[in-house]
């Protein structure tokens, strides 16, 4: 199922850190973490109401934290953030979110 809407089959692998933000091989490699991917339906990935916004990225980061553990997701972000011009900050999760 789609990690964002949960209504359709997740067929598209979405990078939470877009390829356009990774300007070096080291940044790209760091962004290729299981903790920084989502499976999305095509509508959520490339449709007119897609996930390519800051708020929706936060939803997907929280979803991944619930699957893999918040610490794993935060550590993966910290690894890639050392290479980014503008880091991605994962918002604090409320109790019971992860």
Image: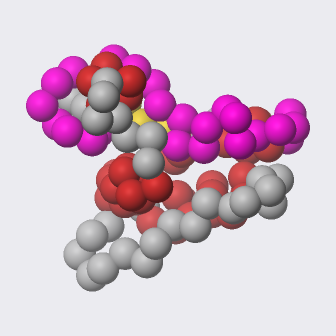
Colour scheme of the rendered structure? secondary structure
Residues shaded magenta = 3-26
22 falls in the magenta region: yes
Please state if 42 lies on the left or on the right of 87 as rendered: left
Position of the C terminus, as image quadrant, is bottom left
Q: Nearer the viewer, residue 75 or 48?
A: 48
Please state if 12 lies on the left or on the right of 98 as rendered: right
Residue furthest front as drawn: 48
Q: Is residue 92 above or below residue 10?
A: below
Prevailing secondary structure of the magenta residues: loop
Image location of residue 25, percent across then percent down: 86, 34
Q: Is residue 41 visible?
A: no
Q: Is residue 60 above or below residue 43?
A: below
Q: Is residue 78 above or below residue 27?
A: below
Q: Is residue 42 visible?
A: yes
Image location of residue 20, percent across then percent down: 70, 35
Q: Quadrant of residue 66?
A: bottom left
> Residue visible at 20% across and 39% down?
5
Q: Nearer the viewer, residue 69 or 60?
A: 60
Q: Quadrant of residue 70?
A: bottom left
> Residue visible at 80% across and 56% down?
85
> Residue visible at 61% across and 37% down?
18
């Amino acid at each position: 199922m789609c990690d964002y809407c949960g209504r359709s089959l997740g067929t598209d692998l979405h990078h939470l850190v877009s390829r356009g933000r990774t300007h070096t091989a080291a940044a790209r490699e760091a962004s290729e973490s299981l903790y920084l991917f989502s499976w999305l339906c095509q509508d959520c990935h490339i449709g007119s109401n897609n996930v390519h916004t800051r708020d929706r990225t936060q939803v997907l980061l929280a979803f991944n934290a619930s699957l893999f553990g918040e610490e794993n997701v935060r550590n993966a972000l910290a690894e890639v953030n050392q290479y980014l011009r503008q880091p991605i900050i994962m918002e604090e999760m409320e109790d019971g979110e992860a």
